[in-house]
Image (cartoon, grey):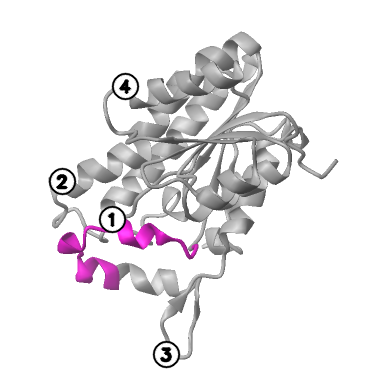
Amino acid sequence: MSISSLQDKVAIITGCSSGIGLATTRLFLERGASVFGIDIGAQPQKLAEDFSTFTFYQTNLTESQAAEHAVAKCIGKHNRIDILVNCAGVSDGFSSADTIHDEELEKVMAINLTVPIHLMKACLPAMKEQKSGTIVNVASKASISGACSGLAYTASKHGLVGATKNVAWRFHQEGIRCNAVLPGGVPTNIASSVQMEHFDSAGFNAFFPVIQLHVSKDSEGAPVPIIGADDVARGIAFLSSDESKMINGAMIPIDNAWSTI
């Protein structure tokens, strides 16, 4: 049995079709979990072909009752939920308080904060009945810093840390744990979620010196993230496993010491 084994666990993972969500889904499946993967995008076909323990559910989790329906589908198939990984997220265009557009603010807050709260709410009854359950929220360096992203993303990820701590304490006597990982820059397709019509170049230029302290550079001087999706996935797997059974309410940076500044 591998370290941080997830053998026979049932996990819901959002954002399973790409980036950190995809890497986490594959790792969980390799470590013996049954994964109910949720994404607004297309099914990751390779996972469906490689693992009979993978179930894909396509939906837009920002729609009314979508989280509840997704959780009900998972329970209908597996009769339980052991792990929830809130991984799906979007970025902003580095907009500041004086440039933020309502459309951008509402979208980022809905996907990065409201959806995870709805999913936690939907999963908690089953976890309370089982007297066990683990939640891992994918937060960010921007959860603990105001100097590396735009207003909407920063506010949403700060909020997710607050929600994580609240859930951890509220249910810590009921066998339920809630932790978060705080990744640094990771090469995923999250940049494609930016509404470029709202990109704030002045805001970006204000934050870029802090970002440069964390990333490497390619031959042309462009920033290159150094943290891989697999690095984050391993952290999520650890927090989801019994290896971390006394870790609750923790915010775990995965950023090669960027969090120290």
Q: Judge the density around disc 3: few (<14), some (14-19), many (≥20) Cα neighbours within 10 Å.
A: few
Q: Does residue 155 show up magenta in the picture? A: no
Which one is earlier in the sequence, the residue at label 4 or at label 2? 4
Cα gap from disc 4 to disc 1, whole angstroms: 25 Å
Question: Quick one: label 4 or label 1, which is nearer the N terminus?
Answer: 4
Label 1 vs 2, first from the N-terminus: 1
- Tell me the residue that label 1 is attached to: 92
- Front position in the image: 134 or 162: 134
Q: Earlier in the sequence, mark 4 or mark 3?
A: 4
**Kind of residue at disc 4:** Gln
Task: State the SS at label 3.
Answer: loop
Please state which amino acid type lies under the numbered disc 2.
Glu
Cα separation between marks 4 and 3: 47 Å
Mark carried by residue 103: 2
The answer to whether mark 3 and mark 2 are in CB contact below 8 A is no
Q: Which residue is mark 3?
A: 220
Q: Residue at x 60, y 9 (%)?
A: 129
In the rendered structure, find residue 65 and report the number of the disc placed on it: 4
Q: Which is more N-terminal, label 2 or label 3? A: 2
Question: Do the residues under discs 1 and 3 have CB atoms within 8 angstroms?
Answer: no
